[in-house]
Image (cartoon, rainbow, N blue to C red):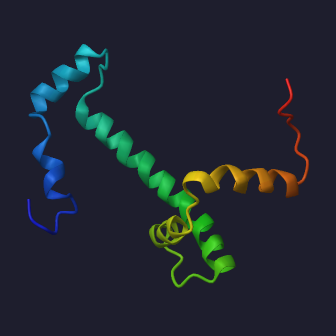
Amino acid sequence: MGADDGVAQGARRFSLPPEQYRLNLERFGVDLPPEKIAAQAHAAFKEYQDEMRPIAAGIAQRRHLASSDYRSVIAALKKEQIVGDAILPFYRQRLRTSKPSSFSTAS
């Protein structure tokens, strides 16, 4: 468990022994082995990464960002994040200036 293994040291500290993890899954009605769940999760994450790459490249190009790597693009977007009391006015203004959509907020 070295610094180069890609997993934060603290992340492993709270993990359960494999058999305890398997038993906990069974208690919640999950009948898949943990290894299969992990494999499915890794495959899904790779699929999401593959979907994010072209989206991030487009955002990076439009915003003239130095990197088009999706991690860098997310970090850049987080720096522009709208927080607190600024959220509602921002989206109200956005709704006033956007094109009408196919849905209505009226009941």
On the picture, is 106 further left or further right than 11?
Answer: right
Residue 46 locus on image (x, y percent) = 43, 54
How many tags in the picture?
0
Q: Residue furthest right?
A: 100
Q: Residue at x 16, y 20 (%)?
A: 23
Left or right, residue 13 beside residue 53: left
Counting from the top left corner in percent of width and height, residue 92 is at 77, 50
Residue positioned 19% across, 58% down in the render: 8
Q: 28 left or right of 72? A: left
Q: Is residue 98 visible?
A: no
Asked if residue 97 is positioned above or below residue 31 in the image, the reply reads below
Say which quarter of the image contains residue 102: top right
Give the left or right position of residue 6, taking residue 100 as reference: left
Q: Does residue 24 appear in the picture of this structure?
A: yes
Above or below for 64 versus 54 = below
Residue, x 86% and y 53% (percent of image)? 96
Please state the horizontal and vertical placement of residue 16, each as a whole percent of the image: 12, 34
Q: Is residue 71 above or below residue 101?
A: below
Quarter of the image for the N terminus: give it: bottom left
Identified at 63% across, 56% down, the residue is 86
Residue 62: image quadrant is bottom right
Quarter of the picture containing the C terminus is top right
Measuring from the top left, give residue 12's x and y in whole percent: 14, 48
